[in-house]
Image (cartoon, rainbow, N blue to C red):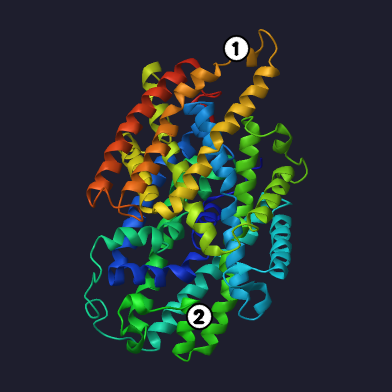
Amino acid sequence: MRKDLGFVGLTAIGFSNIVGSGWLFAALFAAQTAGPAALLSWLAAGALSALVALVMVELGATRPEGGGTVRWPLYASGRVVGTVIGWSVLLSVGGTAAEIAAIMQYAAHYLPGLFHDGRITASGLGVATALSVLLTGLNWFAVRLFARLNNLVSVLKILIPVITVVALFLSGTHGGRLTDHGGFAPYGYAACLSALASGGIVYSVNGFQAPLDFSGEARNPRRTIPAAVLAGIGLAVLLYLTLQLAFLFTVPDRLLVHGWQGVNFDSPFGQLALVLNLHWLATLLYADAVISPGGSAYVGVAIDARHTYALAKSRLLPRYFMRINPRHGMPHRALVLNLLVIIVFMLPFGGWQDIVSVMGIMYLLVYAASAVAAAAFRAHDRERGVERSVGRVPGVRWMAPLSYVVASEFVYWSGWHDLRLALPMVLGGVPLYLLLRWGDRRGAVPGGAADRSPTPVRELVTGAWLIVHLAVLTLLSWLGTFGGSGQLTAPYDTIVVAVVSLAVFLWAVRSSATHLRTSPPPVRPVEAAG
């Protein structure tokens, strides 16, 4: 692939992938869940995202590769983990479908036939399909064209929310909003944790890993990738904080008779603008409801294609899908496959809320597996006496286990209602592994590479930590207080999740280090960083 991306392009990719439909909804849902204390939730999400991102940054800087978030867990932890994570990544293509569903919901303000009763209608599905084809077409030609168009979309995605914040504050604010109507934390500080998931904050800050997936196409990845990832997170969190403040200080008092939980809008900022007689702003916001999700969907199509390319390159999908078009430098067949997945994913779910409730969990599992990969690669390098490679991030030795625990907590805080659907879907990667492995064994040539590969039993033992962790998280979610039965009370449920996650992390690193002794990565870190 062509190395056409610099700091500005990578930062724009990260920011555009973070700021999508979430900014249009999350301020309302976070306020409903935690009141003004939602501001703390945004700060916590930004800090924890930066922690997880720094671990992934080391992988991107020292081992730059297209679709690296798929291949790093495969190299470090073996084929079982690689297949389960790859399966999760393939399912997470539905995240792009969520952005398209958001466009349909807001477009229904002008074209009611597109969206009805929480679902995309038949005619809406036709429009959504056409939009999916258009986004695929825009990604078809070249990385440079992608970067230029995405830079333009990113400018609009910054400008319109900033205009919204300024216009709302100029319309008049209400004093005492951080202390009135029940106080700063009217529903308790534990509600800040609930707001991370149910308030849409996790989904809103998700996507910071986007520049890492373009590490194989970046100029000077050691320098540009860390700066671009952190800059994208910082800009996005700053934007979300100002939007949250604008919402808190401008909602009319008459709507707060029943507290923050009584505030209810279908399209929060658009309807708030109408309530405040800012009709020009409402018109702009309904237009941006197409631009912002459209920008995220545009980036999502490109990222999904690189994930599918990496899956095929890793033999987790047929290698047919890894072919790069020599003229445009793009994996066209992967683009087509993901287009079909996006369209199919909109059929059973049909609404933004239904899709995003599952997609965030898929992303968090990828982050957790990447933390294990970073620690395992470091342990493998120490065993072989490899000098510290250029691009390593100071402190990853302690950040890796902490980020694994953080990602696991985010998954747990998503709640039983979502986990009971998402985690069994992820575990569907295990029978996929067995099916693909059986095909490999059948096609093995005696004495050949496939014939000498580890046995399925050995691979299952190596990757057992991930299967056990998913099963235990499902059980703890059912027992816990985040939508579960409540048999495991707070805060002990969160503490138990942390302890179990740390134990699994140590097991995972040891198992992965053992795997790397017999199946080292195909290239050395120094070579990958070059």
Estimate the x, y position of residue 432 in percent, counting from the top left.
Answer: 60, 33
Which mark is on residue 452? 1
- Mark 2: few/some/many CA within 10 Å (<14, 14-19, 20+): many
Q: In this view, does 416 lie above or below 372?
A: below
Q: Is residue 135 left or right of residue 530?
A: right
Where's residue 5, x and y in %? 59, 49
Q: In which quarter of the image is residue 294?
A: bottom right
Which element is circle 1 on?
A: helix
Task: Give the residue drawn at x 49%, y 71%.
Answer: 24
From the image, tell me which residue sits under label 2: 270
Residue for point 67% across, 53% down: 344
Q: Position of residue 366 (x, y in %)?
A: 47, 42
Question: Is residue 274 shown above or below 355?
Answer: below
Camera-nearest residue between 348 and 268: 348
Question: Which quadrant: the N terminus?
Answer: top right
Q: Is residue 458 above or below residue 345?
A: above
Looking at the rendered structure, the kind of residue marked 1 is: Arg
State how far apart marks 1 and 2 are (Cα). 61 Å
- Specify the farthest residue to the right: 327
Which residue type does callout 2 highlight? Answer: Gly
In the rendered structure, the answer to whether residue 196 lies left or right of residue 148 reads left
Quick check: can you spot residue 207? no
Q: Is residue 458 above or below residue 465?
A: above
Q: Position of residue 234 (x, y in %)?
A: 40, 58
> Which residue is painted at 45% across and 53% down in the image?
418
Residue at far bottom of view: 277
Q: Earlier in the sequence, mark 1 or mark 2?
A: 2
Q: Can residue 124 be seen in this view?
A: yes
Label disc, if present, on residue 374 of the rendered structure: none
